Image: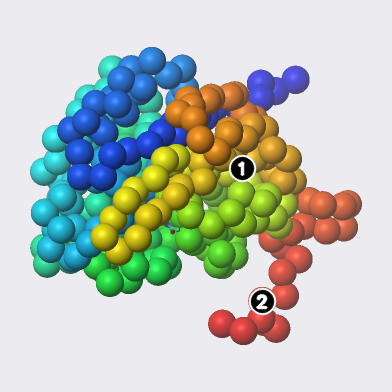
């Protein structure tokens, strides 16, 4: 019998403190030193925190990934531990700032995704993503990145699945409660794995309080919850998954969720 194609995936759920970049990075690095995994997903904006009061404040905290102490620390760790990391990142690029996620590995930055669907006040300070959705192969495992509110647009997960994604890596700072259930559908209709790494805790700002919902989860093709964390506590979790399960798209002998699409009848 052929050996199963397995990979150990995990996430870290925690409560970043807004604006305390080195403190938040320290907590993440401490966790990464100790996790037993091949691929780890971190929340959206885990170093800066989430609720910026202005574009100026965002620019003062955002970084160029090619010139970021946080990125070089994580890449060094990836080299030492033979690890890949998907992390949220406030990305400065010239006069633009994106709510991004980075795929990091022993060779450096393997990919950048810039959030396409900005949520609520994010529209007042971030620039909308301007890069196509793209699957990245890391040693035979195909990674698709999406960020938080992208969950409500099924096109995102579908586009990644059509490109062959095995795992949807989904950094999040969720304040609504519908996403986790919806991601089960994304995993049923595309027969992929998903790892949603959501943050916990509360941010108090002059424009209002933000309460984050935790409940990070890892879901298997078919929408089966492998693990779901609780809503409040810091948590590290990892599990071995079989990638071959995401390569078979048949639902019955005569149905394949990707090949059966009738795209000529769909709106663009
Ligand atoms: C969100 O997209 N951070 C809700």
Q: Where in the figure is residue 92, as x and y percent of width and height?
A: 17, 56
Q: Is residue 119 above or below residue 66?
A: below
Q: Quadrant of the C terminus?
A: bottom right
Residue 261 occupies quadrant: bottom right
Q: Residue at x 52, y 25 (%)?
A: 237
Q: Nearer the viewer, mark 1 or mark 2?
A: 1
Query: 233 or 263, which is in the foreground?
Result: 233
Residue 189 occupies quadrant: bottom right
In 3D space, how far apart are the residues under numbered discs 1 and 2 (Cα atoms)? 23 Å
Q: Where in the figure is residue 38, as x and y percent of width and height?
A: 45, 25
Q: Is residue 262 above or below residue 100?
A: below
Pick out the residue farthest to the right: 253
Q: Secondary structure at mark 2?
A: helix
Circle 1 is placed at which residue position? Answer: 193
Q: Quadrant of the N terminus?
A: top right
- Residue 27 relative to residue 86: left or right: left
Query: 87 or 27, which is in the foreground?
Result: 27
Q: Earlier in the sequence, mark 1 or mark 2?
A: 1
Residue 155 occupies quadrant: bottom right
Query: 237 or 76, which is in the foreground?
Result: 237
Query: 240 or 89, which is in the foreground?
Result: 89
- Residue 43 relative to residue 243: left or right: left
Q: Where in the figure is residue 98, as x and y percent of width and height?
A: 26, 60
Q: Where in the figure is residue 219, as x and y percent of width and height?
A: 64, 40
Q: Secondary structure at mark 1?
A: strand
Q: Residue at x 48, y 52 (%)?
A: 174
Circle 2 is placed at which residue position? Answer: 263
């Amino acid at each position: 019998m052929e050996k199963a194609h397995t990979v150990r995936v995990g996430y870290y759920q925690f409560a970043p403190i807004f604006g305390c970049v080195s403190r938040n990075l320290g907590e993440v690095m401490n966790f990464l030193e100790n996790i037993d995994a091949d691929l780890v997903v971190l929340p959206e904006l885990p170093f800066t925190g989430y609720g910026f009061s202005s574009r100026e404040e965002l620019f003062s905290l955002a970084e160029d990934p090619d010139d970021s102490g946080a990125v070089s620390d994580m890449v060094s760790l990836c080299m030492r531990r033979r690890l890949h990391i998907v992390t949220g990142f406030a990305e400065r690029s010239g006069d633009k700032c994106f709510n991004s996620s980075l795929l990091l590995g022993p060779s450096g930055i393997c990919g950048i995704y810039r959030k396409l669907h900005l949520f609520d006040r994010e529209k007042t300070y971030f620039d909308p993503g301007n890069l196509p959705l793209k699957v990245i192969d890391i040693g035979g495992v195909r990674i698709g990145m999406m960020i938080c509110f992208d969950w409500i647009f099924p096109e995102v997960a579908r586009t990644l699945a059509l490109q062959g994604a095995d795992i949807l890596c989904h950094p999040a700072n969720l304040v609504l409660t519908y996403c986790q259930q919806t991601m089960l559908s994304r995993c049923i209709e595309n027969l992929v794995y998903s790892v949603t790494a959501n943050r916990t805790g509360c941010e108090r700002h002059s424009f209002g309080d933000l309460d984050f919902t935790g409940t990070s989860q890892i879901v298997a093709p078919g929408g089966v919850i492998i693990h779901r964390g609780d809503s409040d506590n810091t948590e590290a979790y990892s599990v071995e998954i079989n990638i071959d399960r995401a390569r078979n798209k048949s639902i019955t002998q005569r149905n394949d969720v990707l090949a059966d699409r009738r795209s000529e009848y769909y709106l663009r």
